[in-house]
Image (cartoon, helix red, strand yellow):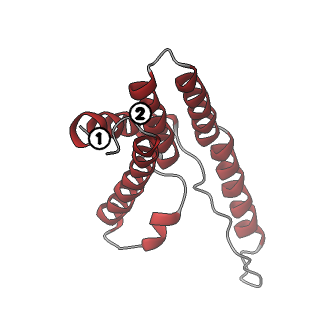
């Protein structure tokens, strides 16, 4: 029913992103021994849900349309931009937030003023992006060759 359709592409992309977020959630529980549902809606961390989603989308386009197709080239180009953003720009923004939070903590150490902290975990390390890419490829192939056949 979904085999070789745009629905398969969409399902695989969304599924990969959701699985990555669930893995982050489980990892957080294992690491901290606490359940924090906010982890399901936050960016950053292992693996990259952005990367998993776009790579699953690209891999599925490649499977359906062929790896030499224009559609795959467009999807892969989109994925590379998202991956670059995840590991580059958003990671730098997180480092800036960490620095500003440290400055704020040092400046207001006497406890008179406590503004909200900036979110520091915005981006991904290259390894987190790589693992997200592997997860996306895995989901695209498993779904296409096992579930949608």
Q: Which residue is mark 1?
A: 143
SS at circle 2: helix
Q: Are marks 1 and 2 in contact (CB under 8 Å)?
A: yes
Residue at 32% across, 36% down: 138
Residue at 44% across, 42% down: 52
Does residue 123 sit above or below 107 in this rendering? above
The percent position of residue 89, horizontal first and vertical second, equals: 69, 41
Task: Work out which quarter of the rendered image holds the N terminus and state it.
Answer: top left
Task: Work out which quarter of the rendered image holds the C terminus and state it.
Answer: top left
Q: Quadrant of residue 33?
A: bottom left
Q: Which residue is mark 2?
A: 60
Residue at 66% across, 56% down: 98
The percent position of residue 79, horizontal first and vertical second, equals: 56, 34
Drawn side of residue 129 relative to residue 98, left or right: left
Q: Decide which of tag 1 and tag 2 comes sooner along the chain.
A: 2
Drawn side of residue 59 relative to residue 42, left or right: left
Count the marks: how many?
Answer: 2
The percent position of residue 54, horizontal first and vertical second, equals: 51, 39
Drawn side of residue 42 relative to residue 96, left or right: left
Circle 2 packing at 10 Å, graded few (<14), some (14-19), many (20+), is: many
Which disc number belongs to residue 66? none
């Amino acid at each position: 029913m979904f085999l070789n359709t745009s629905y398969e592409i969409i399902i695989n992309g969304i599924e990969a992103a959701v699985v990555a977020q669930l893995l982050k959630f489980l990892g957080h529980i294992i690491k901290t021994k606490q359940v924090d549902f906010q982890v399901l809606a936050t960016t950053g961390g292992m693996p990259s849900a952005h990367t998993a989603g776009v790579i699953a989308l690209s891999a599925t386009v490649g499977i359906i349309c062929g790896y030499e197709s224009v559609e795959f080239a467009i999807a892969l180009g989109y994925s590379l931009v998202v991956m670059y953003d995840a590991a580059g720009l958003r990671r730098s923004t997180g480092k800036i937030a960490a620095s500003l939070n440290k400055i704020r903590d040092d400046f207001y150490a006497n406890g008179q003023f406590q503004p909200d902290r900036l979110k520091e975990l915005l981006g991904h390390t290259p390894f987190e992006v790589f693992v997200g890419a592997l997860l996306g490829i895995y989901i695209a192939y498993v779904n296409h060759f096992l579930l949608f056949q």
